[in-house]
Amino acid sequence: MTGFTATDRSMMNRAIQLAKNGRFTTSPNPNVGCVIAVEGEIVGEGFHFKAGEGHAEVHALAMANDKAVGATAYVTLEPCSHYGRTPPCAQGLINAKVGRVICAMSDPNPQVAGRGFDMLRAAGIEVQVGLMEQQARALNPGFLKKMETGLPFVQLKMASSLDGQTALANGQSQWITGSNARADVQAFRAQSCAVLSTSQTVIEDNASLNVRYSELPSWVQEHISESQLRQPQRVILDRQNRLSPELKLYQCEGQVVRVSSHDADVLAPEVAGQGICLTSTLRKLAEKQNINHVWVEAGATLAASFFKDKLVDELVLYLAPKLMGADGRGLISALGLSNMEDVIDLLVKDVRMVGKDIRIIATPVYK
């Protein structure tokens, strides 16, 4: 978009970097950053840290104080216009008498959706929208997808040997990947609203599926203290009512949400021959549990179901430098494909080494 200066871009880039500081704590609220500047000099800045606490604009305005008068505010998401647990940020900017607001993108939340901009313009404040919008959208894939579609953003995590095996024929699988990769998984869990798996996986691995602060990478521990750690909800598909209070799952901090077609925290219908309806499950998690970002740790069968239903938004795959042979257990169960034109293409977004393992992040391209 034209009309923005190099200074505008620099200030917005700073706001985007600030917003990232909240990615372990703001859920289910969006990550937002704000910079207040006068003639290219930052006089105030802030980010949203936790739902129920001050938004990014509140912190930036508090730092700027009287210097906010006539200043330019750079915000990564449209300032809110409604009273929630905090007052509307649009009104805060008006009260501070800023002269201009440059915003990366409008808020798809129906409670805002342009009303924040309308309030600012009605108060005589110049408003420009669209600076670095794609970078701002990348801050909040879950919040945006839930607001725009009613479904949460789904990341599917899988790990295998280089020859695509997840376990030996006898079921042994710990540990395919190294400690660095497992710490990386903890960081992904910490950024999600929910970790989703099946009762079979929980029982077989006696898994807790929570975030363990001591196992988080050091760069995450530099952002948040152990007391600030937010545990994601643990969503377990349990159609045969196999979970029991004795499992490690229930001995760890964090809410457990059981999903079944009967007598469960979240009720979802079953599809003949396929198990619990995943689309219905995700929609109800968004509606009932306020979940907008799901981290799925799946076995081969559940992974195949997510792909068949075109529900995976992003695949996070760890490949260990090991060979396990064709008699092991494969990464994904049968997808029922008979033509090459039906295969699921992947748009690879990132490839890097995590310790001794390879991590690939890719977006499925559904036909």
Image (cartoon, rainbow, N blue to C red):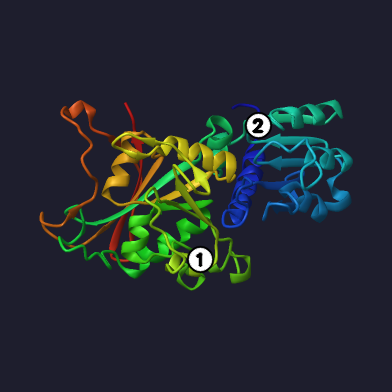
What kind of element bears circle 2?
loop
| Residue in the picture at 39% in, 43% down | 314
Residue 211 at x, y percent in the picture: 49, 64
The answer to which image quadrant residue 12 occupies is top right
Is 78 drawn above or below residue 65 in the view shown?
above
Residue 52 at x, y percent in the picture: 73, 52
For this view, does 282 lie left or right of residue 144?
left
Badge 2 crowding class, 10 Å Cα cut-off, few under 14, some 14 to 19, many 20 or more, is: many
Residue 305 at x, y percent in the picture: 32, 40
| Residue in the picture at 70% in, 29% down | 128
| Residue in the picture at 51% in, 45% down | 266
Residue 219's label in the rendered image is 1
Q: Nearer the viewer, residue 142 or 249?
A: 249
For this view, does 33 lie left or right of residue 347?
right
For this view, does 270 lie left or right of residue 76?
left
| Residue in the picture at 78% in, 50% down | 58
Badge 1 crowding class, 10 Å Cα cut-off, few under 14, some 14 to 19, many 20 or more, is: few
The residue labelled by disc 2 is 106
Q: What quarter of the picture does the C terminus occupy?
A: top left
Is 255 drawn above or below residue 140 in the view shown?
below
What kind of element bears circle 1?
helix
Residue 159 at x, y percent in the picture: 29, 56
